[in-house]
Amino acid sequence: MRQFVGYIFLVVVLFHSCQKDGTKPCTEEEKTAAILTAFPDSLKAGEAYDVNIKYVLDNSCGSFDRFEINSTEKSFDVKLIAEYEGCNCNIEFSEHQVEFTIDVDYPGVYEYRFWQADNDWDIRSITIYE
């Protein structure tokens, strides 16, 4: 009986330690390169415009999660974040598409930088007019 209780205690401790940081087992987030084929040269201030962005997932457990955007006064750094959830994934590269909305309220020239790889960005400029 004592050995059984010790076993249960060990299982509970191991399970708790795996869950301590709040992440699920076999779950990972990764940046994925943005592939743009078209981007507008100009837009009217306050007018929303959707840009189609292609990206590649590395395996069957991947899905698009979110955009991570850091901005300054006239520039936007955009990273696509994919989530890979699952322990038994098939290695298969698959191309997908997501819409990114450009919506700037003030006239000027803006720069959008889309992450490709470490220290590599696809940089697009856009003029916002009144």
Image (cartoon, grey):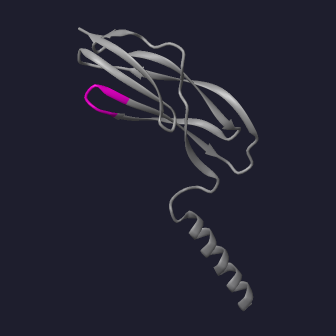
Q: Is residue 60 left or right of residue 48?
A: right
User: Where does the C terminus fall, quadrant-wise?
Assistant: top left
Q: Which residues are magenta?
A: 71-76
User: Which residue is more in the foreground, 100 or 2?
Assistant: 100
Q: Is 38 within the magenta?
A: no
In percent of the image, x 34 and y 20: which residue is there?
103
Q: Residue at x 41, y 19 (%)?
A: 124
Query: Where in the figure is residue 9, as x and y percent of width and height?
Result: 64, 80
Residue 113, located in which quarter of the rendered image? top left
List x then y, in percent, for residue 23.
54, 56
Judge whether 127 appears above or below 112 on screen: above
Instruction: Give whichever of 6, 118 is nearer the camera.
Output: 118
Residue at the image position 53 percent from the left and 27 percent from the top: 34
The verdict on residue 72 being magenta is yes
Classify residue 58 by image quadrant. Answer: top right
Q: Name the residue rendered at 55%, 31% in the picture.
A: 33
Q: From the viewer's side, name the closer residue of 8 and 102.
A: 102
**Compared with residue 38, is residue 17 higher up or lower down, i.e. above or below?**
below
| Image coordinates for residue 15, horizontal then vertical, percent | 62, 68
Q: Quadrant of residue 19?
A: bottom right
Tell which residue pokes out farthest to the front in this image: 119
